[in-house]
Amino acid sequence: MAAGHRSRTELQPGESSEGGFFNLGRREGAKLAYLEAFDDVERMGGRVDTVVQAVASGLGIVAAARAAEQSVAVRRWERSPRLFCAQQTSCSPMVRAWRSAEIGANARLPEPTPGGLASAILLGDPFSSFDYVARAV
């Protein structure tokens, strides 16, 4: 670890570390992974028409949207691919919020007891990042 930096486990009381959605380095890293994946698809003669991403905080889908926007901006593509978010039915606060927002209801519907097989995407209250995801898709 670099001098002057402490791991999350070394934080003192009252200190915090943002390792998720609002960590710019993490979002940019995910965007780079998408750009590399887009390159691989094109190198194999394919075309990226659709991106499907499992979501918790939405970091992956926002990264995909940014990678696609940049690909359009540099005229690599004429248009962005369609973006689809997926959540397991046992923990789908963003899906439920999106559907309720479409009918004019309150868009914050946290999942009080998230559960399911895909533990990496079990986030019951992702609403600090919901607006970013909504703009991306």
Image (tube, rainbow, N blue to C red):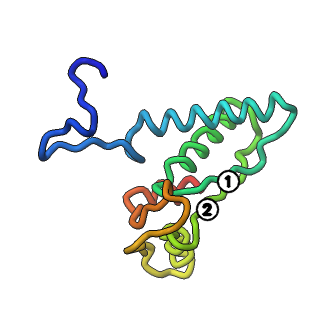
- The amino acid pointed to by label 1 is Val
User: Measured along the vertical axis of the image, is residue 11 above or below residue 121?
Assistant: above
* Sequence order check, earlier mark of 2 and 1: 1
Mark 2: give few (<14), some (14-19) or many (20+) Cα within 10 Å.
some
In the image, is 54 to the left or to the right of 58?
Answer: right
Q: Nearer the viewer, residue 74 or 59?
A: 59
In the image, is 31 to the left or to the right of 12?
Answer: right
- The quadrant of the picture occupied by the C terminus is bottom right
Kindly identify which residue carries mark 1. 52
Marker disc for residue 31: none
Q: Residue at x 47, y 69 (%)?
A: 115
The image quadrant that residue 43 belongs to is top right
Kindly identify which residue carries mark 2. 86
Q: CB under 8 Å between callouts 2 and 1?
A: yes
- The amino acid pointed to by label 2 is Ala
Q: In the displayed image of the protein, which residue is found farthest to the right?
A: 45
Q: Residue at x 77, y 43 (%)?
A: 48
Pinpoint residue 64: horizontal percent, then vertical percent.
60, 44
Q: Nearer the viewer, residue 112 or 83?
A: 112
